[in-house]
Image (cartoon, rainbow, N blue to C red):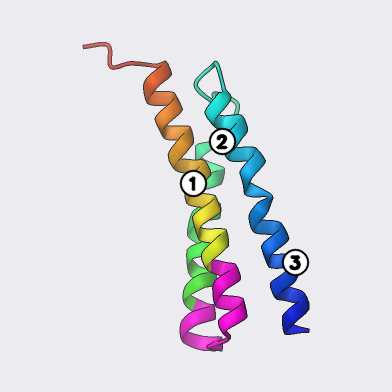
Amino acid sequence: MSALYALFGVVFVIGYVPQVRAVWKSRNGAADVSLPTWGLWCASSTVSLLYAHFVSEDPNYTWVCIGNVAGCYAVTFVTVLRRWSHFPDPA
């Protein structure tokens, strides 16, 4: 079962790539991406990572969580970058 979870975890992590690509190519500052939602997913994936590493001590679970943390933070970071480049500081 652990191997199955690891396999699907890799598939889920790869699933972040199209979202990062779409945000990066956005021409409107990724205005349709919800930063509060992605922020909650970042927090949730971070808590899952901490649980996987410190409580369950399952390496497969931990690696999947690392991938999810990286994916969530990548989408959030690229969204913020796109917004800053699309909506420059008015000063």
Q: How far separated are the C-alphas under marks 3 and 1?
A: 20 Å
Asked if residue 41 lies left or right of residue 89, the reply is: right
Name which residue type carries label 1: Ala
Q: Which mark is residue 34?
A: 2
Q: Position of residue 37 (x, y in %)?
A: 56, 44
Name which residue type carries label 3: Phe
Write down the quadrant of residue 33 in the picture. Answer: top right
The residue carrying mark 3 is: 8
Extreme residue toward the left, this view: 91
Q: Earlier in the sequence, mark 3 or mark 1?
A: 3
Over which residues does the magenta segment extend?
Answer: 51-65
The residue carrying mark 1 is: 74
Residue drawn at (54%, 23%) of the image: 31
Instruction: Identify the main secondary structure in magenta.
Output: helix
Q: Earlier in the sequence, mark 2 or mark 3?
A: 3
For label 3, the SS is helix
Asked if residue 62 lies left or right of residue 84, the reply is: right
